[in-house]
Amino acid sequence: MISRPRTRSLAVLALLGTAMATLVVTLQPADAALQAGRTFARNVLVGADNDNAANTFIQPANVTAKQHLDNTDVLVGGVRGDLLIGMKGSDVIEGGLSSDILVGGVEKGVAPNSDVLSSGHGNDVNIWAPGDGSDFYLGGSGYDTHISAPLVLDGEQVALFRAYGRDVPHVSIDSKPQFTCTVERVPRELGLGFGYITRFFAGGNLAVTIRLQDVEQVLCPSPNAGKVQVARLVGGNPAFVERSLSDFSGSLLGAILQAPAR
């Protein structure tokens, strides 16, 4: 185990990724509020969380008006499968042209903590963990999955594991009777611009609402060992069905879910 750090509405992020493709980025969480991954690398980008009140370059000591971004980070991936982790703040995260893993943050309930994430092309995975705020996830093309479940941590950082030649996080999604989810289609007449929402409940209380567009399935905790709740976002009345974690073995999604080998 190691710890390291399709729509026009987000077209500006795609342009930003192209413009910043030559930016040299390390994998330490101390670079900048803006990080653009190397174009052809398997990037692991972690939010720097350094655009805040403590940064005296951004927020001069003699200025009371807010100049900082409350730890907001902008992370832009490349053309291979990237791992992008926002950490604190309301982050903007843009994947790339392959199968990306996007994590809004590890805020532990500290606001602001509502992220906007777009994964672009590929079969992507977005992970929301308890303590993060209400997010918006735009999946884009491909078969995209949203997961609402606790992340496995190493201290304050997301714990990463090697699978399929890349670093991946794990979630703990089974044996969680304290967590439940619902999913519903958004009425078009509301004009909100996204197709579905999933709501996450902790101890029976509504915690957050995740907005979803161009996302094909949602995974949520199951009260039972070795199980996961899965909803396919098709039609007007999607519903969660319990499946075995082993159904996902042999895939990148299965590695994230810690699915046991058959």
Image (cartoon, rainbow, N blue to C red):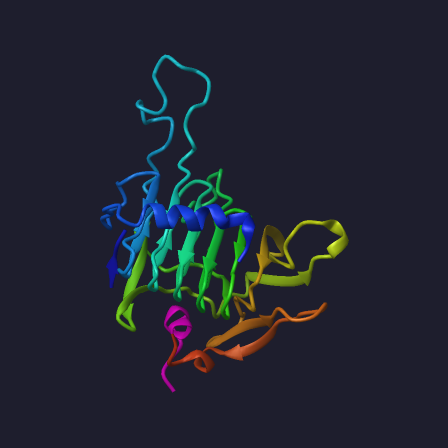
Vertical placement of 88 versus 161: above or below?
A: above
Q: Residue at x 71, y 49 (%)?
A: 191
Question: For residue 92, which quarter of the picture?
Answer: top left
Q: What residue appears at the point 57 percent right and 62 percent down from the top-left corner? A: 214
Image coords of residue 139 (percent x, y): 51, 61
Instruction: Residue at the far right: name it.
Output: 189
Using the rendered image of the protein, determine whether residue 200 is visible from the camera's viewpoint. no
Q: Is residue 103 above or below residue 30?
A: below
Residue 138 locus on image (x, y percent):
53, 56
Question: Is residue 49 depicted above or below 135 in this figure?
Answer: above
- Would you say 17 lies left or right of 234 here? left
Q: Quadrant of the C terminus?
A: bottom left
Q: Which residues are magenta?
A: 252-262
- Residue 38 lies, in percent from the top left, at 27, 54
Q: Nearer the viewer, residue 29 or 171?
A: 29
Q: Position of residue 6 (x, y in %)?
A: 53, 58
Instruction: Return the residue nearer the eye: 218 or 8.
Output: 8
